[in-house]
Image (cartoon, rainbow, N blue to C red):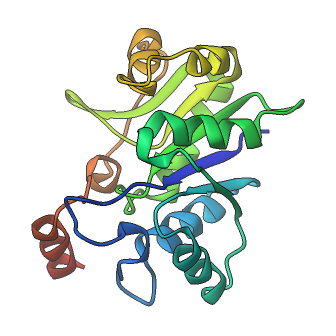
Amino acid sequence: MIPALVLAAGLSTRMGRPKATLPLGEGDTFLTRIVRTLQAAEVADIVVVLGHEADSIARSLEHHNLNPRVVFNPKYQSGQLSSVLAGLGTVDRPGVSAMLLTLVDVPLVSSTTVRAVVDRYRQTRAPIVRPVRGDQHGHPVLIDRSLFDNLRGADPTVGAKAVVRAHVSRAGDVLVDDDGSFLDIDTPEAYARILGEL
């Protein structure tokens, strides 16, 4: 089993309001779009990690009749790694071989990309599998179970990035043609630009 973690606990300081509940075309929000994409890619277990304004974000999911598992991270202000660990504590159980990790800032990933990442992992068992395009690397990132303890021991000031970078490989890099995989929307300007293109 390969569950997915969606990190949506942050303060959204650059955006000025929670990204998770921002509208994103056809009745979706950033977060509901991500959950629907993961469902379309047949990810069976989706866990959303919440922190800042958790109640209103959880209500938004319920309003859209989406029922991923929701985990509250009481340490969300201490940085992104705390949310990774809160989610990891929920998904790590017997039978889990890896996890997908993605951010609420990256809502436009296609289900085709999610499937490509999972398929590459099943073919290669690379410890890190990620979408790439040129020198860009995107989301979701798949992390093999063998690295879960590395995440638990990671430096909070650096976060999961150091673990990912230390274990990337050619086998785990999946070439994709999916702008959404590389599009991090975290400012009002970026958000306005994307709305104009949808």
Point out the image quarter for the C terminus.
Answer: bottom left
Query: As displayed, is residue 48 above or below residue 90?
Result: below
Q: Can residue 147 be seen at all in this image of the molecule?
A: yes
Name which residue lies at 39% across and 62% down: 107
Query: As displayed, is residue 1 above or below residue 14?
Result: above
In the image, 180: left or right of 37? left
x%, y% of residue 127? 58, 17
In the image, 112: left or right of 193? right
Residue 138 lies in quadrant: top left
Q: Nearer the viewer, residue 30 or 159?
A: 159
Point out the image quarter for the N terminus.
Answer: top right
Name which residue lies at 71% across and 44% down: 3
Q: Can residue 118 be seen at all in this image of the molecule?
A: no
Q: Nearer the viewer, residue 109 or 115?
A: 109
x%, y% of residue 165? 38, 16
x%, y% of residue 73? 59, 50
